[in-house]
Image: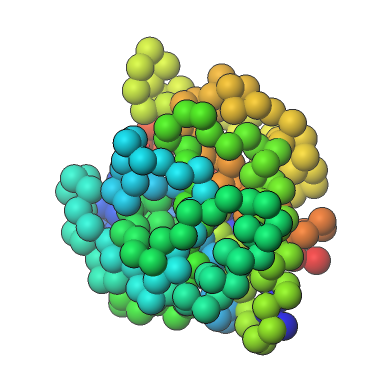
Amino acid sequence: MAQILGGITTSHIPAIGGAIAKEKFQEPYWKSFFEAYGKVHSWLDAVKPDVAVVVYNDHGLNFFLDKMPTFSIGAARQYRNADEGWGLSTVPPFPGFPELSWYVIEELVAAEFDITTCQDMVVDHGFVIPMQLLWTHRLKGACPVKLVPVCVNTVQHPLPNPARCLKLGRAIGEAIASYPEDLKVVVIGTGGLSHQLDGERAGFINKDFDLWCMDKIVTNPEAIAEHSIHDLVRLSGAQGVELINWLIMRGALGEHVEKRHQNYHIPISNTASGLMLLEAA
Ligand code: DHB
Ligand code: FE
């Protein structure tokens, strides 16, 4: 049977891609941010997952405001990246796992989650930056895991509410646990933490709320899930709602998790970065 080993949360800020391309790892602005990934790399290299389920949000590359599914899942052999205009080089395609994707999609639809199925899907910085941070940069482009992208609408309101996202995560966890092949799976939640990129509150960061979320995501994700989307916008900024990706990740891990690593870093660009490594109990 497939087994979920743990979950990782990571920022996906495009500026990180620029810093990776220019190898700014030792620069004062970046040093402690990148160093914090060392423990996560060691864990990944020790447990050697076969698959990563990547819960992220697209920002206008694959879906635009004219057509915006709430939840969509990739079911492709590979996922291409394309130029989004951030000045980042386009990276080679990532390997998919359509058999597992379709299995999860079937289970989710049976569990009354309406999923948009994507047999062709381009992946943006919300997906690519985490892959670079966790694997592809240090492995010289290699991606040792097969990928199941789970894309969540955090862009075009109405957004799915946090409680629904936690439930979706639980359903994903149950689907994976019933997949008949022996596979080691990690679940990644990308984006967050507090940030607002435009408008009167541009640059808004809420350290108290971010640290509260990093605590509750371990011990009591329901406490985060009690918030409405509008609560999250108020407390963590218009783009801070990317936190719902974390809730889906957390739901997939089951009731109890052990926190193995945590780093909170402000700011990167205009945004709070939260790195966490949670092991499924
Ligand atoms: C930034 C943060 C994001 O989540 C994003 O998608 C794009 C940019 C930023 O802080 O620059
Ligand atoms: Fe984002």
Question: In the rendered view, how is the structure colored?
Answer: rainbow
Q: Give the farthest residue toward the top.
A: 200
Q: Is residue 23 left or right of residue 255?
A: left
Q: Is residue 221 left or right of residue 74?
A: right
- Nearest the camera: 252 or 25? 252
Residue 133 location, x and y as percent? 41, 62
Q: Is residue 268 left or right of residue 23?
A: right
- Nearest the camera: 51 or 40? 51
Residue 120 location, x and y as percent? 34, 64
Q: Would residue 278 be visible to someone looking at this image? A: no
- Which residue is drawn at the image coordinates 60% and 72% (left, top)? 103
Please tell me whether residue 242 is drawn above or below residue 34 in the rendered image.
above
Numbered marks: total? 0
Q: Give the farthest residue toward the bottom.
A: 182
Q: Quadrant of the C terminus?
A: bottom right
- Nearest the camera: 126 or 148? 148
Please tell me whether residue 94 is drawn above or below residue 173 in the rendered image.
below
Q: Quadrant of the N terminus?
A: bottom right
Q: Would residue 224 be visible to someone looking at this image? A: yes
- Which residue is drawn at the image coordinates 46% and 22% (left, top)? 204
Please tell me whether residue 106 is drawn above or below residue 3 in the rendered image.
above
Please tell me whether residue 234 is drawn above or below residue 248 in the rendered image.
above
Residue 279 location, x and y as percent? 71, 65
- Which residue is drawn at the image coordinates 42% and 16% (left, top)? 201
Image quarter for residue 2?
Answer: bottom right
- Which residue is drawn at the image coordinates 48% and 54% (left, top)? 116
Residue 101 location, x and y as percent? 53, 70
